[in-house]
Amino acid sequence: MEYSKGNIGRVFTVRLDQGDDILSELEGLAVKEDIRSAMFMMLGAVKEANLVVGPKTNDVPPDPQWEHFSDAHELIGAGNIFMEDGRSRIHLHTSAGRGDSVHTGCLRERSEVFMVVEVFIMEICNMNASRIFDPERGFAPLCFENDFEDRN
């Protein structure tokens, strides 16, 4: 286990409206406001989304299993914002449901808001953390200052 500690900085309350793309809007806000480390939660509804719902097999690096839906689903999610390759990147896990159909996974690519999504972002200050791609694992895990030299 590795960890770092920081302090809560600015707090943002965000409303995304019908047709907005969740990931694109959040990344745009992170760039505009220079949010380099944050955690967030959201609730609302999404009309269309792509989710990685797990690996196809238990191999590393994983071959992602995708789920797509294109009808309105209620949405709840939790995620974070950290730097990766010099830019703010969103990592967001959601659960979206409509009737008896529930999809849970990592939201990726297109994600279109249905009516409204409300996002509550808490910036984390005084933390030197970043995502660095690890080819052996096939993704960019969160790394802390003492890891940077080992991974670069």
Image (cartoon, rainbow, N blue to C red):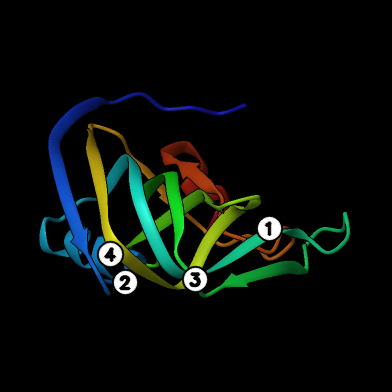
Q: Position of residue 45 (x, y in %)?
A: 37, 56
Query: Which quadrant is the N terminus positioned in?
Result: top right
Q: Are marks 1 and 2 in contact (CB under 8 Å)?
A: no
Q: CA distance from mark 2 to mark 4?
A: 10 Å
Q: Amino acid at mark 1?
A: Val
Q: Are marks 1 and 3 in contact (CB under 8 Å)?
A: no
Q: Amino acid at mark 3?
A: Asp
Decide: few, some or many residues near mark 1? Use Cα within 10 Å; few <14, some 14-19, many ≥20.
some
Q: Between tags 3 and 4, which lies in front? A: 3
Q: Position of residue 92 (x, y in %)?
A: 46, 52
Disc 3 target residue: 71
Disc 4 target residue: 27
Q: Is residue 44 above or below residue 71?
A: above
Residue at the image point whose x is 60% and y is 72% from the top = 68
Disc 1 target residue: 53
Residue at the image point whose x is 30% and y is 34% from the top = 127
Q: Position of residue 148 (x, y in %)?
A: 47, 48
Q: Amino acid at mark 2?
A: Asp
**Comes first in the chain, label 2 or label 3:** 2
Residue at the image point whose x is 41% and y is 40% from the top = 145
Q: Is residue 110 above or below residue 105?
A: below
Q: Between tags 4 and 1, which lies in front? A: 1
Is residue 4 visible in the rendered structure shown here? yes
Disc 2 target residue: 21
**Comes first in the chain, label 1 or label 3:** 1
